[in-house]
Image (tube, helix red, strand yellow):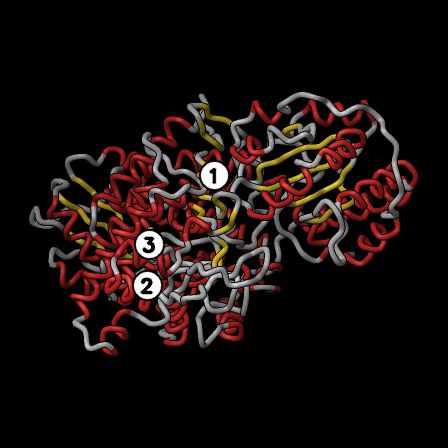
Amino acid sequence: MHKQIILLIFIIIIPINCGEKRKQQKNKMNRLAESQSPYLLQHKDNPVNWFPWNKEAFKTAKQENKPIFLSIGYSTCHWCHVMEHESFEDKQVAKLMNDNFISIKVDREEMPEIDHLYMSVCQAMTGRGGWPLTVIMSPDKEPFFSGTYFPKTGKGNRPGMLELLPALINAWENKQDDIQKTIEQVNNYLVNINTTKQSNELSRSILTTAYNNFIERFDENFGGFGKAPKFPSSHNLIFLLRYHKMYNDIKAKTMVEKTLSQMRLGGIYDHIGFGFHRYATDQKWFLPHFEKMLYDQAMISMAYLETYALTKRKEYAKTAEEIFTYVLRDMADQNGGFYSAEDADSEGEEGKFYVWSNNEIIKILGFEEGQRFIDIFGFKKEGNFHDEATGELNSKNIPYLENKLSHYAKTNDLDIEELKTTVEKNRSTIFNKRKDRIHPLKDDKILTDWNGLMIAALANGSKTLNKDIYLVAAKRAADFILLKLRDNKGRLLKRYRNGLSGLQPHIDDYAFLIWGLLEIYESNFDISYLKSALDLSDILVSDFLDKEAGGFYIGPENGEQLIIRAKDSYDGAIPSGNAVAAMNFIKLSKFTGNKKWEEIAENIFLAFSDGINQIPSAHSFMLSSFMFNTINPKEIVVVTKQMNPETISSVRKLQNIYNPHSIFIVKDMNNVHELNKIAPWSIMHSTVDDKITFYICENFVCNKPTTNIETAIKYLQ
């Protein structure tokens, strides 16, 4: 399939000169000026006559019989900036585009279904993908050419826009038969990959197959999987932790701890201001791609929290808290939601905000303290950071730790606690100095799905670390989303910015927010959050479920009409919406006692079982959900005469035991009406001798109730 598509594209791309068709518009700003997307607004001053994705664009393309030039990216994408500067700001390129194409800009973070669909086309045609994503298609949204970044003029084997555009124009005018053959093949391919049928049930052996996949790819020296680039992919680590718990496999835990320790030492971590960059371009986690994404902070913090819950090693808790410090300080909107990302670039250079020369550090800290800081954080006189343009060292340094502070203290005969205090004091001083620099652009749109992940992480942090500050932040964000990002029928909206809410929701918006609401419920046991999770789950089923084959579509039934309705089960930088929905519904089945939720989850497994069996390690969160449903899941009900700090303290002692396949319900006998409606199976649970009473159940069959917390702990263990 892939070779056929490539061959046809090769046939139609024959460079020729093309004549003018109409004069370039002389508007100072194009149609993107009316958008709320920071990414689209970055392109509002381009000489390209950009359209947003809307009916007007496709109507104009049909009327003028022009192909669509579709460009997909996001605001903090480095190579998107490069292509904009080289091509879209260039008047010669813009004239070719304006005369011969209808050009559409899409923010992938706002329209993930469109991005997913056309990215799958790009991967089929070229064997690779990435952003900026470039797609040429008919006015009927049918693609016949795709690629990623294109410079103005050709470089090596990569054609430039000045060669590519005339060839595409020639193909559109003179090679329609070839184009239609390619379109037909692409359409057949899209139908094939987005059509699922219920297959065989998953076997528990698939868990071990996935585990062995990770062992084969594990980097024994630096952690992570594969060589370079390296992504955190925290859902893989969470799967391994749970595999270790279920099978007592030490290697699974070792792989996680090695990875998290090396990530924390490396330049992928912002040692000055906290938080993780998007990925490392090298094997050692040293050289990051400097973007900071909200979803990474959420997922990585959850991996550190879960590792802390298992090991009780404080370094993991500390890293999670530092991530939260960054998010609450730099990414929180005053109304409660969280912003999307921070750019890699500042002042036109990637990483400039984050790197330092030795002289800068010594000037800030003084010679003695500065030299110690330089030694600890791996600085070199000539720099350890290469200039992107020249590849030369440029006297700038990325802070990283070659070894842990304990190693430095031992080597230099220093007291470790005093060293930690000194390093933190100096870090804070440098951080305050860094505030004076020109900051990277902040993408300040608030996305429902990514906020759902951050809500889940913070609520998880509040119960794992027993710190209410994180629960307060999680509740504020959840309340904001439920108030500002729903329509008058209770359906979610995608994006909030500048006081305006809008855009069609997708499966991730529902799945991730429901996850966050369930985590809040298990942190404070306010039944309203559990009820909201159930209400949104009903809408998710109504609007997104494939009622014949199982599984959820990316877009809603009444949403944007594309050439195919896409489905997806693979994890990417974050878990797939279907995998998270499966986990949510398994938990809802345990909360409510209603088997319909479990049946929907099981049908998700059946719908995607062929793909899971083909590449199990690409479905790690789906397998975590499957594991939850099959290996000793527990329902823990704590009954109390009155909700009070003693009750929460007792629950926290039970939650302190690492038992990932469990749900917690607290039943306040003074306020049982709503819980009895939602979880009727718990109606008969009551206190014994008016004391806090613990019911430890498996598949709704409970051990003898106990008022002794130590007995309850033994039941759990």
For label 2, the crowd category at 10 Å Cα-Cα, with few meaning under 14, some 14 to 19 and many 20 or more, is: many
605 lies above or below 173: below
For label 1, the crowd category at 10 Å Cα-Cα, with few meaning under 14, some 14 to 19 and many 20 or more, is: many
Secondary structure at badge 1 equals helix
The amino acid sitting under disc 2 is Thr
| Nearest to N terminus: mark 3 or mark 1 | 3
> Residue 453 bears which disc, if any?
none
Residue under the point 39% across and 56% down? 356
Image quadrant where one finds the C terminus: bottom left
Secondary structure at badge 3 equals loop
410 lies above or below 173: below
Residue under the point 19% across and 77% down? 413
Residue under the point 42% across and 60% down? 397
Spatial CA distance of label 2 from label 1 is 26 Å
The amino acid sitting under disc 3 is Ile
Please give left or right for residue 452 compared with residue 694 in the image. Answer: right
> Residue 307 bears which disc, if any?
2
User: Mark 2 or mark 3: which is in front?
Assistant: 3
> Residue 272 bears which disc, if any?
3
| Nearest to N terminus: mark 2 or mark 3 | 3
The amino acid sitting under disc 1 is Asp
| Nearest to N terminus: mark 2 or mark 1 | 2
> Residue 509 bears which disc, if any?
1
Please give left or right for residue 655 compared with residue 38 in the image. Answer: left
Residue 305 visible in the shown view: no
